[in-house]
Image: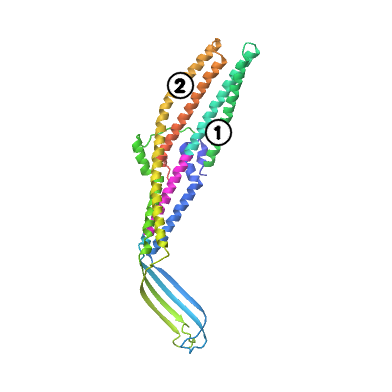
Amino acid sequence: MIIAPALLSALTIDEAIYQTINTNPQMSIKKAELNTENELLTSAKSGYLPSIDLSYSIGPETTQTIANFRKDVAVTRQEASATLTQNLFTGFDTMNGVEQQEARISSAGNSVADSANSIALETATAYINLLRNKEFLNISKENVEVHKKYLDQIQESVDAGVGRSSDAKQTLSRYENAQSVYHLSKQNYDNSISSFQRLLPVDLQSNPINKPTIGKLPVDNLEELTNMALLFNPLVHVSESDLRFAEAALRRSNAPYYPKLDVVAQAYWNQGLNGIPDTARYDEASGYNALLVLSYNIFNGLNDSANKEANRYRLVNQQSTLADSKRYIEAFTQIAWQTYNSTQTQLIHIDRNIMASAETVAAYQEEHSLGRRSIIDLLNIELEYNAAKNRKVTAEYDRILAYYQILIHTGKMLETMNVTLK
C-alpha cells in the first residue's frame, strides 16, 4: 500500500527514494536499535533511585546452643526483612553511566539518519544506473541496425561482383562485435533492473521511471560545501556521539578507585534463630536499623586498571574513527564536486563532437552515393558517432549522480526531498 501511489504514474527519483527509505528493512533495524537505547536510559538512571528488597525464608533447623544446653533441638526457622538501599556516592559511576547511555542514544539516532542517507544514495545510484544502462542499450541497438544496413549493402555489392569480399568480411566482423556489445548492454540493463528492484520492488515494464533533473546545490562553493558536510553529515555525527560515549566510559572506569557510600535501612522479623522451641517467649526477635555503609575495594586482581586502559584505547580508537570519517566526507564531497563541474565542461565538447560527427556521417553518406567513400569509411565515422553518444550518456549521468552525491554528503538530501524520518 505504501508503494501503490508510485504505481499510478511514472516513478520519479524523489518518490523512489522516499518509498525505499520507508520500506527498507535496514531502517526498521536502526529504529528498533534507537528504541532499545531509549529504554536503556531508564536503566542507567536507576542508580539515582533507591532499591527496595523484601525477603522471607522458612524451614526446619536442628541446632545445639548454650540456650538449649547443647541438645539437638528441632525448630522451624523463619526470617523476614525489608531493606531499602540508597546509594549516596559510587565514584560518579551512575552519572557517567547516564552520559554513556545518552551518547548511545545520540549515536543510534544519527545512525537512523545515516542509514537513510546511505539508502538514499544507493537508491539514487541504482535509479541513475538503470536509466544510464537503458540509454546504452538503445544506442547499441541502433548501432546493430546501422551495421546490419551496411552489411546488407556491401553484400549486395559483392553478390553483384562490384564489391570486395574483404570489405564484406570486415563489415561482418564489425556487425558481430556490435551484436556482442548489444547483448552485453542488455545484460547490464537487466542486472540494473534487478539491483533497483532489490531496493524497490516495482514493475518497471508498466511503470517507467523518469529521468531526473539537476536542481540547485546548497552552495556553489567547494569550501562551503565541505564545511557543510562536516557540520551536517550524519556519519560524522555518529562518530562524534561514539567519541562522547568513549570519553564517558573512560571517566566511568575511575569509579572503582573511589569508596562507595550507601544508606541502608532495614526492618526485620525472625523466629527460631536461637534453637529454642517455639513455646519459648524469647524465640521471636524483630527490629529495624538505619546504617551508613562505607565500602572500599583496595584490590581487584588488576581488573580495574586493565578495564581503564582498555577504555583509554577505545577512546583513541574513536578519536581516529572520527578523524577518518571527516577525511572520508571531505574527500568524497570534493570528488563529487569535481565530477559535477568536470562533466559539465565535458558535455559542452561532447555535444560539439556529436554534432560534428552527425554532420560528417551525412556528408560521408552523400559522398558514398557518389562513389567517393567506401562502406568501411561509413562504418568508421558511424563508430566515432556512436562512441560520442556513449560518452555523452556517461558524462550526463555521472553529473546527475554527482549532484545527488553532493546532497548526500552535505546531509541535505532528505531535506531537499522533504523526507521526514519517523
Image-quadrant location for residue 89: bottom left
Q: Secondary structure at mark 1?
A: helix
Asked whether the viewer can see residue 81, the reply is yes
| Type of the residue with mark 1 | Asn
Q: Earlier in the sequence, mark 2 or mark 1?
A: 1
Q: Residue at x 57, y 33 (%)?
A: 187
Left or right, residue 158 beside residue 333:
right
Instruction: Please give the residue where the numbered disc 1 appears in the rendered image.
Output: 188
Q: Is residue 225 above or below residue 180?
A: below
- Foreground pick, 231 / 316: 316
Q: CA distance from mark 2 to mark 1?
A: 26 Å
Asked whether the viewer can see residue 152, the reply is no
Label 2 neighbourhood size at 10 Å, few (<14), some (14-19), many (20+)?
some
Q: Secondary structure at mark 2?
A: helix
- Magenta segment main secondary structure: helix
- Foreground pick, 2 / 414: 414
Instruction: Please give the residue where the numbered disc 2 appears in the rendered image.
Output: 353
Q: Is residue 285 above or below residue 139?
A: below
Q: Residue at x 52, y 29 (%)?
A: 135
Left or right, residue 241 beside residue 193:
left
Magenta-drawn stretch contains 61: no
Q: Position of residue 202 (x, y in %)?
A: 54, 39
Q: Position of residue 138 (x, y in %)?
A: 54, 27
Q: Position of residue 342 (x, y in %)?
A: 41, 30
Q: Residue at x 60, y 22 (%)?
A: 173
From which residue to which does the magenta span run? 96-122
